[in-house]
Image (cartoon, rainbow, N blue to C red):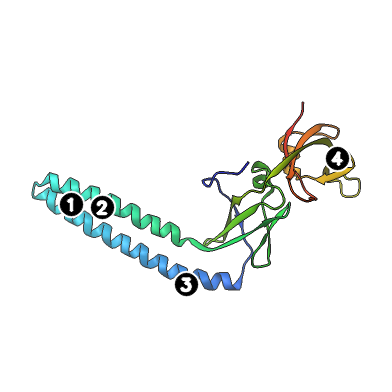
Amino acid sequence: MSESEGDTYTFETEPDVDVHANQREHGDARNRLALQMLKQTRDSLSHVIQLLEEGDTTRATRQMVHFVSQKKLVETELESGMEMRVIEGVFDGQGMVGADGVRYTVPENYASKSKLVEGDILKLIVKLNGNYVFKQIGPVERRRLVGRLGIDSSTQEPIVQVDQDVYKVLVASVSYFKGIPGDEVVILIPSGGTSVWAAVERLNN
């Protein structure tokens, strides 16, 4: 059920004084790396041009291969420098409650696609450009249940009823499967304990 590490979903964060202070600090380091890369590029290309002018194509080719590999290493350093801070937390059905005590909103499309359930461990990376990137790193054990899709009369939000139990589900999950009240659905909940929210796995058509 877990999502691969390569998939990421981003959204804009709200302004934060500490964040902007860290941005300046990390921005200086990133600028130094960028300057280093530009100088390496200049020096490497100058050397390659000199070798070509001297007719030494073999050494020029080797130098170009070395330049490309070094360029990739510096680019990787620049990318890693974009990761300003990392926060781990627990998914509560709609958002992530971080170890710092702050609740972060998780995009519904991501939560629905990943079929997140209460208790899943997430990692939040706050980028220098102000974006949030979520990754699912610790899925809890799941249990499947079959119920009927309905609408909460007081909130007009989708729910799934399983016998006497009622679970909230994300609007994005219902929309994705084009579910309507009365549809039989398969949901996922944590295998241990109780939960308020469930993830929609599929419709039983």
Indicate the amino acid at tag 3: Glu
Query: Badge 2: how crowded within 10 Å, few (<14), some, or many (20+)?
Result: some
Quadrant where the C terminus sits is top right
What residue is disc 3 on? 25
- Marks 1/2 in contact by CB < 8 Å: the verdict is yes
Q: CA distance from mark 4 to mark 3?
A: 51 Å
Indicate the amino acid at tag 4: Gln
Q: CA distance from mark 2 to mark 4?
A: 61 Å
In the rendered image, residue 1, in percent from the top left (x then y), is placed at 63, 41
Q: Earlier in the sequence, mark 1 or mark 3?
A: 3
Q: CA distance from mark 1 to mark 2?
A: 10 Å
Secondary structure under tag 2 reads helix
Q: Which mark is residue 48?
A: 1
Q: Earlier in the sequence, mark 1 or mark 4?
A: 1
In the rendered image, residue 106, in percent from the top left (x then y), is placed at 67, 53
Query: Badge 3: how crowded within 10 Å, few (<14), some, or many (20+)?
Result: few
Secondary structure under tag 3 reads helix
